[in-house]
Image: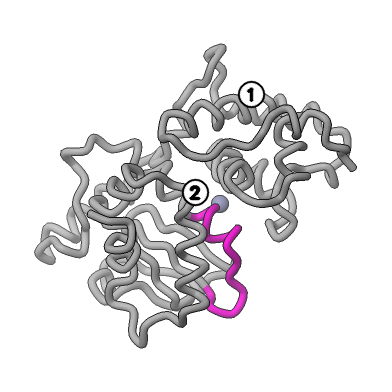
């Protein structure tokens, strides 16, 4: 399936359609993922939902949600990225997509299917099963080079960071978000690594070098663009 088809499929059920500006934001955020990653997310049913108070109709009565308190959030049991239309940024979207990727890469390909395509009883059972998963994200169990877990990488970063203001997180990210657990550490790292804030990338390399190595390796696996290490190493960190 083409990238364009996948992007439009991820907007199924949205009415009225998203404005060209928001569609452009989605397209830009999805540039951080290869076609094979997008295909995997698409076969798992990952989709966008621009309503902070609700979920797509297929999941009503199956999951209860609170109003969104952040610009965007990924909901693992239904694989939906909900967002506020008025405070959305590409960085937020990329971060939530990284959560979606981190979730679906964890499941064997044969288990992946769009939950909203299942008959209701099966959909209910599948959502219930996913909601009971204690560690839905691959980053909760993965180990990188040197066999460090993402949590250990995060603790090294916490110890290394001279001041909180030198966080590698994107400026629009809520303070301390990347330290809330290995999956937040991974998602924000992914968003920064594939984003446009060079200062953030330089800090990621300096203070969270193990995560940087991990993301660089992952990026090569999927043939994605990779920041220039030499440029980042000499970048003046403030
Ligand atoms: Zn997050």
Observer able to see residue 111: yes
Query: At 64% from the left edge and 24% from the top edge, which residue is drawn?
Result: 210
Which residue occupies 71% across, 36% down? 204
Q: Is mark 1 within 8 Å of ligand 1?
A: no
Q: Tell me the element at label 1.
A: helix
- Disc 2 marks which residue? 32
Q: Position of residue 238 (x, y in %)?
A: 90, 43
Q: Earlier in the sequence, mark 1 or mark 2?
A: 2
Q: Residue 180 in magenta?
A: no
* Residue drawn at the location 55% of the way across and 32% of the way down: 215
Which colour style is shown? one colour
Q: Is residue 236 above or below residue 88?
A: above
The answer to whether 234 is drawn above or below residue 144 in the figure is: below
SS at circle 2: loop
Mark 2 vs ligand 1: CB under 8 Å? no
- Left or right placement of residue 109 versus residue 175 in this view: left
Residue range corresponding to the magenta coloring: 84-96
Position of residue 136 in the picture relative to residue 114 (left or right) = right
Q: Residues within 10 Å of mark 2 (few under 14, many from 20)?
A: many
Bin the neighbour count of mark 1 within 10 Å (Cα to Cα): few under 14, some 14-19, many 20 and up.
many
Say if mark 1 contacts mark 2, CB within 8 Å.
no
Task: Determine the image quadrant of residue 9.
Answer: bottom left
Q: CA distance from mark 1 to mark 2?
A: 20 Å
Residue designated by label 1: 210
Magenta span contains residue 93: yes
Quarter of the image for the N terminus: give it.
Answer: bottom left
Find residue 161 and report its horizontal and vertical position in percent.
Answer: 81, 33
């Amino acid at each position: 399936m083409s990238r364009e088809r996948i992007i439009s499929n991820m907007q199924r059920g949205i009415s009225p359609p998203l404005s060209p500006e928001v569609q452009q934001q989605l397209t830009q955020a999805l540039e951080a993922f290869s076609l094979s990653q997008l295909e995997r997310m698409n076969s798992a049913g990952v989709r966008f939902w621009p309503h902070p108070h609700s979920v797509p109709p297929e999941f009503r009565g199956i999951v209860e949600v609170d109003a969104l308190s952040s610009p965007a959030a990924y909901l693992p049991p239904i694989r939906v990225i909900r967002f506020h239309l008025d405070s959305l940024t590409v960085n937020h979207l990329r971060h939530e997509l990284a959560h979606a990727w981190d979730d679906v890469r964890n499941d064997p390909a044969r288990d992946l299917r769009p939950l909203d395509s299942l008959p209701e009883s099966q959909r209910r059972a599948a959502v219930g099963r996913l909601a009971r998963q204690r560690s839905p994200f691959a980053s909760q169990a993965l180990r990188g080079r040197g066999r460090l877990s993402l949590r250990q990488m995060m603790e090294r970063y916490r110890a290394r960071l001279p001041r909180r203001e030198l966080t590698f997180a994107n400026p629009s990210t809520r303070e301390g978000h990347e330290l809330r657990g290995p999956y937040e550490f991974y998602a924000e790292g992914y968003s920064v690594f594939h984003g446009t804030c060079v200062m953030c990338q330089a800090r990621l390399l300096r203070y969270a070098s193990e995560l940087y190595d991990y993301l660089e390796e992952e990026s090569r696996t999927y043939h994605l663009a990779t920041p220039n290490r030499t440029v980042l190493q000499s970048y003046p960190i403030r």
